């Protein structure tokens, strides 16, 4: 569980407090529990089932990561909106686990990168979602809390990605940010086993010793004027020059 970061643990505490609050509120501070116990009890069971699934997923993370991911998403779904921060932390932690065998690059210069992440495609929809959630909250309609918190978390992540290049060629290595929730990693040419441009995605297969990961870079990350085909062609040319 060493790859589970502080954001995840903070999110789990928030989710637990949220479920406790919902339980206490429904049982003691409303008349719903006495008037409609057949409706309220299943709601409480659903929330606590989601919390238990999240805890089980946490315990299984280092042993059976893929099973843990499925259980965590089920648990998060059952405890929304209180589990949004936990979900974000889990996604970041999962990426850290997936790419732990690569060298993380802490010194970044996205302004001079070969290909920058188009964060406008992330930040603008996130800001609209957050504003919409806030308006709905003040009006008092719909799942305003979920929309507001999700928009703010996506906005936060978009701002974080401004500091990361999508891809930068550096002699016989590239700097790559493989997913929306990952850090940037230094990848030697010899680690890249396959490059495939298909429709609007650039698919890379990375392999070193017993480690292998498949990555799909999508068009929503590419800056204007850059396509999966053109980026794939540049990567192949670079790889031919530097792969041993």
Image (tube, rainbow, N blue to C red):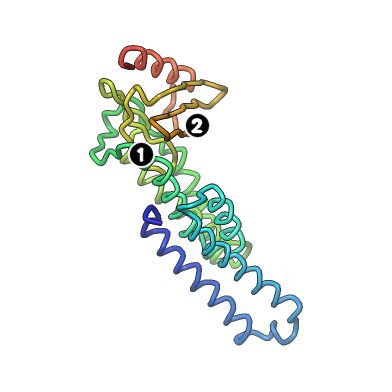
Q: Is residue 18 above or below residue 95?
A: below
Is residue 115 left or right of 59 when viewed as pictured?
left
Residue 149 percent location from the top left of the image: 49, 59
Residue 155 percent location from the top left of the image: 43, 49
Q: Gap between marks 1 and 2, in whole Å? A: 18 Å
Nearer the observer, 126 or 41: 41
The residue identified by callout 2 is 216
Kind of element beneath mark 1? loop
Kind of element beneath mark 2? strand
Res 209 label: none
Look at discs 1 and 2 and give the one toward the viewer. 1
Counting residues from the start of the chain, the first of labels 1 and 2 encountered is 1
Is residue 160 left or right of 71 when viewed as pictured?
left
Nearer the observer, 123 or 207: 207
> Which quarter of the rendered picture does the C terminus lie within?
top left
The residue identified by callout 1 is 101
Q: Is residue 40 above or below residue 73?
A: below
Q: Name the residue at 42% across, 38% down.
A: 120
């Amino acid at each position: 569980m060493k790859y589970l970061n502080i954001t995840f643990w903070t999110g789990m505490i928030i989710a637990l407090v949220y479920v406790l609050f919902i339980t206490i509120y429904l049982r003691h501070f409303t008349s719903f529990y006495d008037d409609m116990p057949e409706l309220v009890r299943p709601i409480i069971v659903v929330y606590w089932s989601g919390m238990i699934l999240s805890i089980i997923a946490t315990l299984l993370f280092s042993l059976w990561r893929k099973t843990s991911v499925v259980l965590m998403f089920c648990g998060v779904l059952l405890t929304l909106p209180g589990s949004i921060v936990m979900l974000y932390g889990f996604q970041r932690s999962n990426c850290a686990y997936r790419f732990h065998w690569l060298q993380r690059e802490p010194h970044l210069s996205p302004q001079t990168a070969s290909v920058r992440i188009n964060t406008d495609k992330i930040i603008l929809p996130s800001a609209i979602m957050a504003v919409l959630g806030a308006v709905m909250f003040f009006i008092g309609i719909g799942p305003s809390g979920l929309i507001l918190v999700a928009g703010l978390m996506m906005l936060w992540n978009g701002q974080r990605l401004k500091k990361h290049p999508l891809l930068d060629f550096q002699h016989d290595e590239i700097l790559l940010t493989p997913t929306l929730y990952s850090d940037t990693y230094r990848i030697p040419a010899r680690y890249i086993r396959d490059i495939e441009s298909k429709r609007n995605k650039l698919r890379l297969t990375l392999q070193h010793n017993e480690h292998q990961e498949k990555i799909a870079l999508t068009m929503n990350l590419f800056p204007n004027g850059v396509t999966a085909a053109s980026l794939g062609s540049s990567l192949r040319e670079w790889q031919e020059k530097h792969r041993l």
